[in-house]
Amino acid sequence: MTSASTVKPTSDFFRNNNYFGLKPENVVVFQQGTLPCFTFEGKIILSSKSDLARAPDGNGGLYRALRKDGILADMEKRGVECVQLYCVDNVLVRVGDPLFVGYCLSKGAECANKVVPKNAPNESVGITCKVDGHYQVGDGLVMLSNIILDAIYLSSKKLSCSCLYEENDEIKFLTV
């Protein structure tokens, strides 16, 4: 997945390097969506007098782009059963981690993500948690005041799992 500014250079890079030995039809480059930018006061930001400023739509935009650009349908057609998803700037990712993928497969997990302990209660990271019976990454939780976070952290280690934004997902899970 690329952004508007990296889609052409990324495609060119793969083409110029003969797709690193892969068949060109097996290298799929698609673009992340964007959202309008706002100030902290909720006002729209303009990039020019007549254009809205836009920014990539974040980690969640991946799922929309996979569906919108037909990537999920293509993977189903090819018989792909699971994928590893991670953020490009995640230095902790072990690409194709056989232990993680094997564990997920052995447990029949439709979706799994890796977590590590937070360094401090006020560390600004997503928190893997359960809300109304459903697991999610609670990015909004980092907006709580440090005092509230300290109290939550000390009283419940359940909110101490920092999400690495690395997932192993079954295609059938992503297409629901």
Image: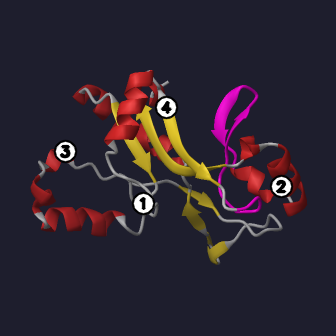
Amino acid on which disc 3 is placed: Asn
Q: How much space separates mark 1 and mark 4, taking CA atoms?
A: 19 Å
Mark nearest the camera among 2 and 3 is: 2
Asked if the magenta segment contains residue 127, the reply would be yes
Q: Which dot marks residue 88?
A: 1
Residues packed near mark 4 inside 10 Å, few (<14), some (14 to 19) or many (20 plus): some
Residue 88 screen position, x and y as percent: 42, 60
Amino acid on which disc 2 is placed: Leu
Q: How much space separates mark 2 and mark 4, taking CA atoms?
A: 27 Å
Q: Is the C-beta separation of discs 2 and 3 under 8 Å?
A: no
Query: According to the image, label 3 marks what residue?
Result: 26
- Tell me the quarter of the image containing the N terminus: bottom left
Query: According to the image, label 4 marks what residue?
Result: 111
Query: According to the image, label 2 marks what residue?
Result: 149
Residues packed near mark 2 inside 10 Å, few (<14), some (14 to 19) or many (20 plus): some
Q: Which element carries disc 3, helix, strand or loop?
A: helix
- Asked if residue 79 is positioned above or below residue 159 in the image, the reply reads above
Nearest the viewer among 50 and 131 is 131
Query: Is residue 43 visible in the rendered structure shown here?
Result: yes
So how many labels did they put on this image? 4
Mark nearest the camera among 2 and 4 is: 2
Q: Is the C-beta separation of discs 4 and 3 under 8 Å?
A: no
- Asked if residue 99 is positioned above or below residue 30 in the image, the reply reads above
Disc on the earlier residue, 3 or 1: 3
Q: Which element carries disc 1, helix, strand or loop?
A: loop
Amino acid on which disc 4 is placed: Cys
